[in-house]
Image (cartoon, grey):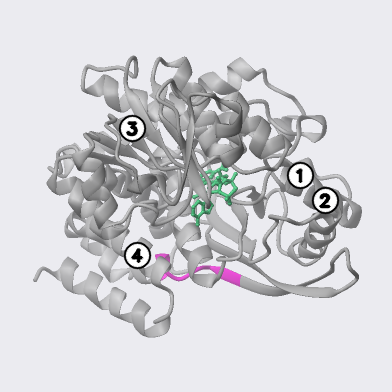
């Protein structure tokens, strides 16, 4: 065993003994550690500085009570979280997730990934994540407002435009951001740059809503270009029907591909003629309905219950855009049988370690979340710039910058993989490229 391998095993053991019940966090750590050995071999000074020991421990983590009153007058209590993981290269930045599954392990996994994603954008932003186990599904607008106001009443103590700038994630869209921004402003006065993903009337950026989905397709197009191909005529299996999925479906269609499926947590629709993103948008964003409703409106679409990854249809590219670990080893084997050549992550950590291994063995290319879905946070950082300048850029300006950032992320990850002799292992490439800048910043700033 090399010094680097021994060191990585030691840090991992410490993490497991400190937090034995955080499986998602450990999975994210393993994904990262599996790629980083060659960098440590080249930089023994990182081992001496115990860089990984410091990097895997959040700079700060908050957990707080969120009491609120439901429409029936009952007092409900949820749990709120914010993990400010690493601020070496800029203010903490990362979304808030409202979903019943949210716990410290999930927030830490997301916050850890966010460090490298944010670094890859080339913009000066540190990594953070937060959220609550509150479930917005089935709640009235008034309930969502009372909950988010209570949530922000505590969170506002810890955030600020130069300190920590949250955004949306699962269950947190324009409505929730609007309520949270309102409560922050009520308590602290006007500070546009404290949240991103805001609506356009109060400091939001054009193209932020579309950014993660569009960015995923710009990244995919860059990957295909590297192989001398384009999206024209390609078939895509897409999961999710939320913010990322809707705009991924739009851009895929604009670039000439056919999106065969869309899904939510109950089931999925299959349409061989291609999913119409406008109908999904109307159902999910306006009516707050279920993906099942799509099949009631589109004659060529069929609805099935269960996971879209258990459905057999031939396709070229998988774009998981729902949630973590949606593709396990068995589903990966199925994707390979169905002809998938590329799996690019719109969701964070959508493939289990077994799935990643199966794809690697079958020479299916995997674009990891920290690279493929970095478009959202990149445009969030551009929203921060516009807020500081008190200017609004045009849709085209932001979209062009987003495209360039996604192409650069692909290029940097590919180059890092090549430098370390890892071929087209873009997962390792993204880890290495994202780590480099953070590591150099941490080394320069001393033991803090
Ligand atoms: P969203 O708008 O809330 O949509 C999430 C979608 O995924 C919904 O269709 C939801 O179905 C489905 N879903 C959620 N949990 C699921 C589960 N356990 N099983 C099956 N389906 C599930 O969220 P989003 O913003 O699109 O985020 C989707 C993914 O992208 C997440 O992993 C998020 O971390 C990642 N991401 C988002 C952004 C961003 O800018 N929004 C940026 C980077 C990464 P239901 O409606 O039934 O819940």
**Alpha carbon separation for disc pair 3 and 1:** 32 Å
Of 446 and 333, which appears nearest the observer?
333
Q: Quick check: is 57 in the magenta stretch? A: yes
Q: Indicate which label's residue lies in the foreground, 3 or 4.
A: 4
**Alpha carbon separation for disc pair 2 and 1:** 9 Å
Sequence-first tag of 3 and 2: 2
Specify the segment rendered in magenta: 54-61
**Alpha carbon separation for disc pair 3 and 4:** 23 Å
Residue marked by disc 3: 410
Crowd around label 1: few <14 · some 14–19 · many ≥20 (10 Å): some
Per the image, label 4 sits on a secondary structure element best described as: helix
Q: Is residue 316 visible?
A: yes
As displayed, is residue 285 above or below residue 75? above
Residue marked by disc 2: 141
Residue marked by disc 1: 175
Per the image, label 1 sits on a secondary structure element best described as: helix
Sequence-first tag of 3 and 4: 4
Sequence-first tag of 4 and 2: 4
């Amino acid at each position: 065993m090399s010094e680097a391998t021994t060191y990585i095993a030691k840090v991992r053991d410490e993490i497991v003994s400190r937090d034995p019940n955080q499986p998602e966090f450990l999975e994210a750590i393993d994904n990262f550690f599996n790629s980083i050995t060659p960098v440590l071999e080249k930089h023994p000074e990182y081992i001496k500085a115990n860089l990984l020991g410091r990097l895997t421990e959040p700079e700060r983590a908050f957990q707080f009570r969120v009491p609120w009153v439901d429409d029936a007058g009952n007092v409900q209590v949820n749990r709120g979280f914010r993990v400010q993981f690493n601020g070496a290269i800029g203010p903490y930045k990362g979304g808030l997730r409202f979903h019943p599954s949210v716990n410290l392990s999930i927030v830490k996994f997301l916050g850890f990934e966010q460090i490298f994603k944010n670094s890859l954008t080339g913009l000066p932003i540190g990594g953070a994540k937060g959220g609550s186990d509150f479930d917005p599904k089935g709640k009235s607008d008034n309930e969502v407002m009372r909950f988010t106001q209570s949530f922000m009443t505590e969170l506002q103590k810890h955030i600020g435009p130069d300190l920590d700038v949250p955004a949306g994630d699962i269950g947190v869209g324009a409505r929730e951001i609007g309520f949270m921004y309102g409560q922050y402003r009520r308590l602290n006065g006007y500070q546009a740059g404290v949240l991103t993903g805001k609506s356009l009337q109060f400091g939001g950026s054009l193209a932020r809503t579309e950014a993660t989905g569009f960015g995923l397709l710009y990244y995919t197009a860059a990957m295909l270009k590297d192989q001398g191909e384009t999206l024209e005529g390609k078939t895509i299996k897409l999961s999710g029907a939320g913010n990322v999925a809707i705009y991924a479906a739009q851009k895929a269609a604009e670039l000439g591909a056919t999106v065969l499926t869309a899904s939510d947590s109950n089931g999925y629709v299959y349409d061989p003629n291609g999913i119409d993103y406008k109908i999904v948008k109307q159902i999910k964003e306006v009516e707050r309905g279920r993906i099942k409703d799509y099949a009631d409106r589109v004659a060529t679409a069929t609805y099935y219950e269960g996971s879209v990854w258990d459905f057999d249809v031939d396709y070229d590219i998988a774009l998981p855009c729902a949630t973590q670990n949606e593709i396990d080893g068995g589903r990966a084997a199925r994707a390979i049988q169905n002809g998938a050549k590329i799996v690019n992550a719109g969701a964070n950590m959508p493939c289990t370690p077994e799935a990643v291994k199966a794809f690697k063995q079958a020479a299916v290319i995997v674009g990891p979340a920290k690279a493929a879905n970095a478009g959202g946070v990149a445009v969030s950082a551009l929203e921060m710039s516009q807020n500081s300048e008190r200017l609004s850029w045009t849709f085209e300006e932001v979209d062009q910058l987003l495209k360039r950032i996604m192409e650069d992320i692909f290029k940097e990850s590919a180059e890092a993989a090549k430098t370390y002799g890892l071929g087209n292992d873009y997962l390792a490439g993204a880890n290495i490229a994202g780590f480099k800048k953070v590591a150099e910043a941490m080394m320069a700033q001393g033991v803090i």
